[in-house]
Image: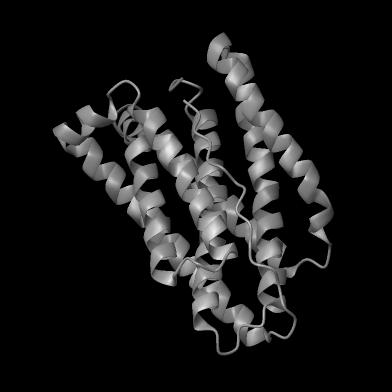
Amino acid sequence: MNYSNPNNVSFPAAVSGASSLDFNKVLRGIYILMGAGLATTAIVAYLTATTPALLNLAAQPGMWLIAIIAQFALVFALSFGVNRRWLSPTGAAIGFFAYSALTGFTLSLVFLYFATNEPRALFSAFGTAAALFGCMTMFGLTTRMDLTKFGTYLMMALIGLVLAMVVNFFLNSGALGLIISWAGVLIFTGLTAYDTQKIKEMSYALEMQGDSSLTAKVSILGALTLYLDFINLFLFLLQIFGGGSND
């Protein structure tokens, strides 16, 4: 079972004049928020998998689709609300953690399956995802290469990946599923570096002195972007380590 999150978060228009102190502040906030979002996902997944009523609800036909639609709506609302400057930092934080909780709810059955039947695959996928994510974020932060030129190609590849997943939903081909999983790992590995550099440049460019509200909201969007990259990277790796047994 593959699970794909939207990766179309956009940021407010930049204004020149920020210092490296602003960048460090934003980056620290982003990773704290991202970690809190991942913890929320794990806690909700565990509570859902261990609570019969919630587990039965998650297993209901159509519930997964409803949750996915709600997640897309939350991402759109967060991105649009911050860019239009009408969403408060508190509202953005609530939206981010609501998204994280919904992700835990929708993935509870997947986590339950692997925790029960293939715990090694679960831990291997998480460890590999963490290592890849860490390496690519460091690359995105330190490289002098301009990664923005790869953005269009990565987005096109992501669209192709989603279309292939839709096709394989009907074909249910194990071979195609494995190809999709490897392609997903490559795409989200690249997106991690690309998004990290995008956040870095945005943080340098934004004039954040004296505007703690904008800093907080941009940190939430950055956390959501990297959260999506990590979750997708982990799930595609889980497909590979699990040998496609969760399709």
In-front residue for pair 139/19: 19
- Residue at 63%, 17% (x, y): give it: 176
User: In the figure, 247 relative to 196: above or below?
Assistant: above
Looking at the image, residue 228 lies above or below residue 246: below
Residue occupying image coordinates x 61% and y 83%: 208
Picture quadrant of residue 52: top left
- Where does residue 189 sit, x and y in percent of width and height? 66, 47
Residue at left 54%, top 47%?
129
Q: Is residue 152 left or right of residue 128?
A: right
Task: Count how many numbered circles sit on residues in the image.
Answer: 0
Question: Up-down: is 90 above or below 118?
Answer: below
- Left-right relation of 156 to 223: right
Residue at the extreme top: 171
State the image coordinates of residue 221 (x, y, percent, origin top left): 54, 62
Q: Is residue 172 visible?
A: no
**Residue 212 at x, y percent in the picture:** 50, 82
Q: Quadrant of residue 115?
A: top left
What colour scheme does the image use? one colour
Residue 34 placement, left or right of 211:
left
Query: Residue 36's spot in the image, x, y percent?
Result: 39, 62
Q: Residue at x 49, y 74 (%)?
A: 216
Residue, far left: 52
Report whether residue 36 is seen.
Answer: yes
Which of 179/30 is in front?
30
Residue reaching furthest bottom?
Answer: 210
Q: Is residue 122 above or below residue 21?
A: above
